[in-house]
Image (tube, grey):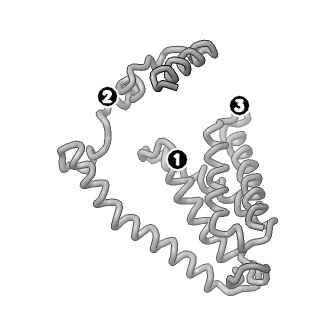
Amino acid sequence: RAGVCTINATAGGGLAALLYTTISSRGAVVFPHEIANGILGALVAITATCASVHTYAALIIGFIGSLAALVSNELILRGQLDDPVGAVGVHGASAIWGLAAVGLFADGELPGIKVASGLFCGGSARLLGVQMLLAVSIMAWSLVTMLPFFYLLGMAFSRSCHFRKGLRVDPRDELEGLDHVMHSTDPRSRKPTVMQTQEDSETSSYKLGL
């Protein structure tokens, strides 16, 4: 059941991501990164529920989890917050939805697992409340522990107490491109050909002694 639910959630998430990127671009283009983040959001959402819900519910959970990730990432982008890989939407918003989904779709009558039934399966709102308390607790613990950790780590690397510096690179390097600054690549160069890729692979293997 857990495996089938995971697969179903992936299908639901992929469908939601495809619809989202098609509608947002007005049918002009399908953005691969949105498809990928949507599927990842669905997988994150089904993690908490895969053993305690029906297989059809997994489609719904994955569908909504995908949209939660994509919409959250869009809001973060519009707010000009720094999250280049969309981690907050995928591992934040989708995870919160996944925890809430336990309180909605969990079925205590399913074999092989002991869990209270969720709100949509004849249960009360108690399980949903417990799940939301869990989400708040995780966020609070992460904030209390990680905020000072990364602040102190940023101070050690930047040698500055200013919180906006921390682990960030120089703004000029961001605009120029870190690949160019740190690896001397030309951002305007064309994609490598198959022959170049093979040559690079052979060179790397030779240097490693393979």
Q: Residue furthest right?
A: 56
- Identify the residue at horizontal 27%, vertical 54% (top origin): 151
Gap between marks 3 and 1 measured at Cα: 22 Å
- Give, as a three-letter code, the residue at label 1: Gly
- Give, as a three-letter code, the residue at label 3: Ala
Residue with the mark numbered 3 = 28
Q: Position of residue 202 (x, y in %)?
A: 55, 18
- Identify the residue at horizontal 18%, vertical 46% (top origin): 160
Left or right: residue 120 versus residue 88 is: right
Q: Quadrant of the N terminus?
A: bottom right
> Label 2's element?
helix
Relative height, residue 15 to residue 147 (above, below)? above
> Label 1's element?
loop
- Give, as a three-letter code, the residue at label 2: Arg
Left or right: residue 86 versus residue 82 is: right
Q: Residue furthest front?
A: 209
- Identify the residue at horizontal 76%, vertical 56% (top origin): 7
Q: Position of residue 200 (x, y in %)?
A: 53, 18
Relative height, residue 190 to residue 51 (above, below)? above
Residue with the mark numbered 1 = 86
Q: Earlier in the sequence, mark 3 or mark 2?
A: 3
Q: Which quadrant of the view contains residue 30? A: top right
Residue with the mark numbered 2 = 172
Q: Which quadrant of the view contains residue 95? A: bottom right
